[in-house]
Amino acid sequence: MNGTTVTGRWLVWPAPEALTRVGVPRGRLVLDGLLLAGVCGWLVISAYVSGAFPGWYGVLPPLGLALCVAAVVGYHRTTCANQLSRSLGLLAVLVALGLAANATGAPVPATLLWIVVSITAMERLPLLVALVTVLLLAAAFVEADDTGILGAGVTTAAVLLAGYSLRLDAEARSAGFRLLAQERAARDAEAASAALAERARIARDIHDVLAHSLSAQMVHLEAARLQIESGADREQILERVVAARSMAREGLAETRHALSALRGDMVPVEDYLRELAREDRAEVEVTGRRRPLPAEASQAVRRVAQEALTNVRKHAPGARTRLLLAYEVGEIVLEIRDSGASGVVERAGLAASGSGYGLLGMRERAELLGGTLDAGPEGEGFTVRLRVPA
């Protein structure tokens, strides 16, 4: 498997980001353009300085340069498309132009062309193909270099090093670009997932509110209808209607709170508790350093407070009630304690029932959040205590 992996590395093309030069800084592109213009100028000037193009032959260097530029542009496109045969064909055009220049007595532009071919091959072709290309051009370097094999060896080593360095630089840049793209995609996916989860939570809350409110209203209105049919007292019928109206008012208020959460303008949980407690003239105390709460923890506090106060109103009317919201290390604690009233025994089952969502449902929600909810008699009254991580 390792042998296969190594062979694959020798035959694989550079990454698309490396070939397209995506993410290259503007300054680097300007410098590369100036370098290319300098090489082009050097090719033409050295061709004229060699004296190999007298008279009407003087038009050949500019024409050769235009052909070289066209071949290089085409080579860039074919390598981006990983078209090996066409890429090698365009490099062959450059090599042939170099051979023609060397044959006419202009070795300097010929050598420059072969250097460009060697470096671009090392930078943009599969590594094995690039090495073969450079080694084949080593014979041309020997022919054009006055120092023979030694000079050609130095030139070959230099172009190998330069081309491979450019290849590594492009690969490193493309790897960084891919990692950045993956990180952005992961952040976008995480944000989308969080948004969907928040919408699902709010939708669940609205569903819970409406389902409870409407079903409770149906129960009271159906009871009122039966009482009317049986000829019950006006007071009994009115009691059912008032209860249905109260349930409708509470459901509407909770729906508004859920919609406010959807719009992102929920009131702080402390203000919500004070507003909720004002109707029952309950005391509210907040301790600890206040901090933003996760949406699930905030909703759990609101729901438990609402359920507990409803239970007090139903089972201990007139009792003094105190709400304590404590910001502790790593968690939020809500305690609702009332002074009690007659019928304490009647309230022993509140941990499993209650108006609205029920303390059993609240306990399940707290446990889903990694918290706890305890409810039961304490002294002469009743206490509900919620703890959730926050």
Image (cartoon, grey):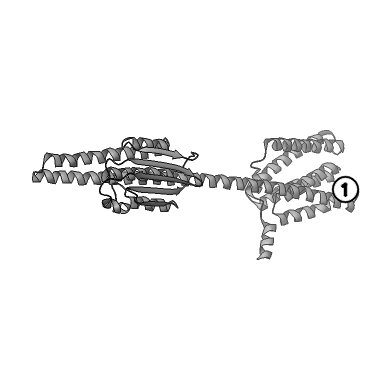
Closest to the observer, 22 or 251: 251
Say if residue 361 shows up in the picture.
Answer: yes
Kindly give the residue lying farthest to the front in the view shown: 379
Quadrant of image for the N terminus: bottom right
Closest to the observer, 141 or 225: 225
Position of 324 compared to 9: left or right? left
Q: Position of residue 186 (x, y in %)?
A: 54, 47
Q: Position of residue 246 (x, y in %)?
A: 25, 39
Position of 270 compared to 107: left or right? left
Residue shown at 31% from the left, 54% from the top = 352
- Say few, some or many: other residues with alpha carbon within 10 Å of mark 1 (under 14 / 14 to 19 / 20 or more): some
Q: Position of residue 32 (x, y in %)?
A: 73, 38
- Look at mark 1 in the image and give the residue it sits on: 145
Kindly give the residue lying farthest to the left in the view shown: 231
Give the mark count: 1
Residue shown at 67% from the left, 35% from the top = 26
Kindly give the residue lying farthest to the top in the view shown: 55
